[in-house]
Image: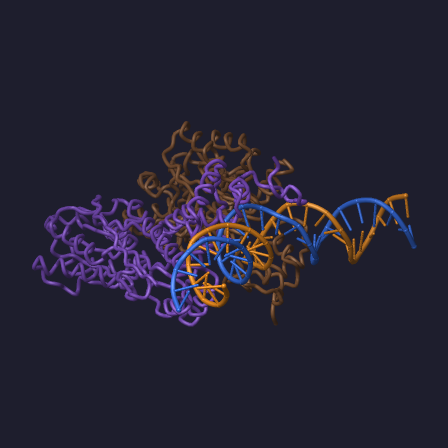
Chain colours: A purple, B brown, C blue, D orange
Amino acid sequence: MALKKTGKKSVRRKGVAVTIDEVAALAKVSPMTVSRVVNGHSTVRESTRERVMQAVSDLGYIPNQAASSLAAAQDARIALIYTNPSAGYLRELLLGALNGTARTAAQLVIDDWDGLDTNAERKAARALAKGVAGVILPPPLCESKVVIEELVSAGVPAVAIASGRFNHDISSVRVDDFLASKELTEYLIQMGHTRIGCIKGHPNQTASTRRFEGYQAALREAGIPFDPALVQQGYFTYRSALPAVETLLALRKPPSAIFAGNDDMAAAAISVAHRRGLDVPRDLSIVGFDDTSAATTVWPELTTIRQPIATMADSAIDILLRTIRRKENDTRVVVDHVVAHQLIKRDSVAPYTAPAGKSRG
Amino acid sequence: MALKKTGKKSVRRKGVAVTIDEVAALAKVSPMTVSRVVNGHSTVRESTRERVMQAVSDLGYIPNQAASSLAAAQDARIALIYTNPSAGYLRELLLGALNGTARTAAQLVIDDWDGLDTNAERKAARALAKGVAGVILPPPLCESKVVIEELVSAGVPAVAIASGRFNHDISSVRVDDFLASKELTEYLIQMGHTRIGCIKGHPNQTASTRRFEGYQAALREAGIPFDPALVQQGYFTYRSALPAVETLLALRKPPSAIFAGNDDMAAAAISVAHRRGLDVPRDLSIVGFDDTSAATTVWPELTTIRQPIATMADSAIDILLRTIRRKENDTRVVVDHVVAHQLIKRDSVAPYTAPAGKSRG
DNA sequence: ATCGCGACTGATATCGATTTCCGTGGCTGC
DNA sequence: GCAGCCACGGAAATCGATATCAGTCGCGAT
């Protein structure tokens, strides 16, 4: 009756689950062989394999994941580094990453690198490299040369999320910012707008540039002359967009629509418009980008481009894990995963109407 | 120089991460003691604890989840359930919980129960109970009788975060909403305001009631008559506060200050005020509650009560883990942890001035 | 003074699986 | 006929952390 181990003075509680040793005993082989069969490793004679498999199913053996990770040193610890993103953005990122790690039993560690200078970033990256098996880099970190450099040289796989472009050094998961932005602008044009203001995102991020290029491309294709006066610099934050929008609306010939580089800035645009007594969307149409929670928090709700951040973070975990597992072969694989975006039409856009009666005193 | 273990013929590759042994070596204690400190076990001298903690942070030690689960013969999966909180709130919650789980090698699993009816909630709770070792319940779930009932009867420890009051069935980590709210209102009164509007939070949450009571108490103590017309119902969301604020400002004798039940609603108040051409804080002072990211996103930044959600979530993890470990003794321990709040003064409040020159045409 | 007890800590044995390093046998090749 | 290989499968050593149990130290009780 008694399983092996009976003799040992096991003072430790013993789990209720079936272990590899029990399977081995029943199949009359060593636990090592069971492991080989279960993991499909090296060579095991067909007859032996069958005996083991039989024992496995008889006992309903399920390998202990903790033990497996520990022994295989596959304890995939994945880091998610962030630097001051908007609450809505971070929320999506965390939700997606958490989902991915829960699904794969990976361990997620997060860290805030806000305010680090290049030097500190390099040090942080170096330290991080020896503590984790993979890293997820959302903007703007995904464009930091020193960080990528350190990570790559340390051999730690990383994946950039929403980076705006593919950097062949590390994998990336992103949407096509150019196309999305072009579509969004085209929609505005379809609605009759021709004077479309633009609040650019942070200049150190490629995504900003891409989105701006998409905006320009749409204008060009529609034969609408590009007016530099309608473009203002923003930094992706709500606050940064405030003065930018003020400037736009103070123009002698103000725009009838504004394309903000992200939802937070679009929300700021609504706020400024309201402060100036403008009705959105009647007097001014506004669109954002990302479809974070900010888009549906404000009133009216924003027409925007949905970028599935959570799903993207989840995919990033997958890519990382796959790379980590394959690491043994030393085959460095870098993938560029472009996911579909989607134009979400809500209430912040209305067809263009000539500015008739001034609505304020 | 060399850490212990030097003599052994380690044929195995060794992990890159910092291990408990390294921490122990640096702190000059045994790994066991480090384990005790990290997991909040009771019996460790204060001086020792500090030395260990110092070593932990110096090395950036993060326990290996796999090893921990294996040794403890249980994987400490802790669930964080949420139902549609604001982005800022959820962000804090996640950040804090993640921090706690990283520190203690627990695994965080999250789930969205938004829109579940009582029945579905009961089923979800029952299912959850058999999959995790502990649960964190933020509002409004922390007041759901069925959920608590199921969890308690299943013997799964839970802790309520920011619940507004102590329910002796489960542990809780919270601030004193009544006191905090009273302080905040007193501050407004000190600044000379006497007509103070109030946007209440969601009626199904005790915290809302508490905050409202604090508001009333401050008024009473200051001898200011309570005017029901100045009180409006909100639901903690930005959107819900919009009409409430409109109503308040449309009053024949509008308030000179508004106390919103949380930051999101305060942000909404600013937005409405701006839309009506009011200057904040000159024409209208506004205060929020929570100090989530919304407080510093809007302009002007909000004077508010800082409720350390992230820290609270972190503590919740600690409490949970301690309870889980003590489980064998079957001593059910329920604690009520009240943490300090803090009045944060920013730019949304100004001393009261009689409404002199109308500022709009 | 000695015993007992509680507060602290460390030594040691495991947890369950995998990696590394070695034995067997059976076959092939010269 | 024997070295050389290869297919197979086992033994032992870990992986990193925790449960147990055995001290150590200090101090009031006996």
Image coords of residue B89 (percent x, y): 42, 47
Q: Is residue A280 visible?
A: no
In this rendering, the answer to whether B312 lies above or below A152 is above
Can you tell which quarter of the image residue B113 is in? top left
Q: Is residue B290 left or right of residue C15?
A: left
Image coords of residue A352 (percent x, y): 12, 49
Residue closest to the eye, B279 or B195: B279
Q: Quadrant of the N terminus of chain A?
A: top right
Residue closest to the eye, A218 or A101: A101
Q: Is residue A15 left or right of residue A246?
A: right
Q: Residue at x 41, y 70 (%)?
A: A117
In this rendering, the answer to whether A226 lies above or below A21 is below
Please state the total of marks drawn on the protein image: 0
Q: Is residue A2 left or right of residue A147?
A: right
Q: Residue furthest left?
A: A223
Image coords of residue A122 (percent x, y): 42, 70
Residue closest to the eye, B4 or A21: A21
Q: Is residue A339 visible?
A: yes
Image coords of residue B232 (percent x, y): 38, 36
